[in-house]
Amino acid sequence: MLANVYLNEFDREYEKRGVPCIRYADDIVLLAKSERAAKRLLETSTKYLEGTLKLKVNQEKSQVVSVFAIRNFKFLGFALGRNGAGIYVRVHPKSWEKFKSTLRELSSRRRCQSIRPSLERIKVYARGWLNYYGIASMKNNLDDINGWLYHRIRMCIWKQWKLPKTKKRNLIKQGIPEYFACMAANSRKGYWRTSNTTTVKRALSKERLIRSGFYDLAIAYQSVHVNC
């Protein structure tokens, strides 16, 4: 709030100069038509901030980059893309890494002692993340993470069933023939590999997991993105 009040003078100054300026709190992007003009802007804006407003500019973060250089340009977790249809907003790679890292922690076998509370924690976090980033174009990336997350939840449930007899009984309850249930329950493969077999995927289908509280990222994104 204080940054918005104090830097209002900066906004008005660069508006008078005719420079496109985007700012959120103390994060500022100034747009120029060429690299040479951008370098001049960086120099003059630094002088204004440090000389007139008596602020300290972070020299390590202040740089001249193309807004389409996805590895270099990042603003509030977003980046820009360009294709034949024009310019679009996308999620920056570092934001994707943080999202997946948090989901990995929330869906770890260590934390998923009880699946329903874990699904609720994932839902709360993922819903907030999607509400923030929903404006971005990210269908393909989100589909990949969604499939990966389904796999991790199946893995957690498979571990919770523990004993072969429990696994067999639960598989049969979900409509798996006894022969295939017995084969899967007594498999020597690890949790990750077994939870991705056809038998376990049929027993713990997307529909069943959603009814149990799974927050399907792809479905939620369609709703959020359309309404942005």
Image (cartoon, rainbow, N blue to C red):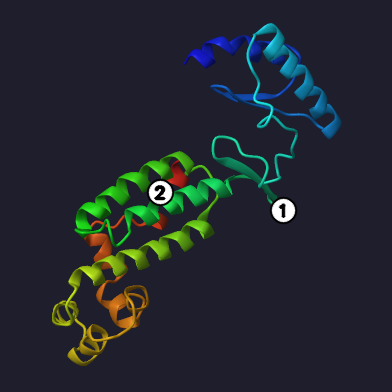
x%, y% of residue 16? 73, 11
* Number of numbered markers: 2
Q: Quadrant of residue 6?
A: top right
Dot 2: what SS?
helix
Q: Quadrant of residue 196?
A: bottom left
Dot 1: what SS?
loop
Nearest the viewer among 105 and 25 is 105
x%, y% of residue 95? 52, 46
Mark sitting on residue 223: 2
Mark 2 burial class by Cα count in 10 Å: few <14, some 14-19, many 20+:
few
x%, y% of residue 97? 51, 51
Q: Residue at 72% x, 18% y: name it.
A: 46
> From this viewpoint, is residue 126 visible?
yes
The answer to whether residue 215 is left or right of residue 92 is: left
The answer to whether residue 127 is left or right of residue 161 is: right
x%, y% of residue 201? 31, 76
Q: Is residue 19 above or below residue 76?
A: above
Q: Which residue is mark 1?
A: 84
Q: Residue at 33% x, 79% y: name it.
A: 194
> From this viewpoint, is residue 34 visible?
no
- Tell me which label, 1 or 2, sits earlier in the chain: 1
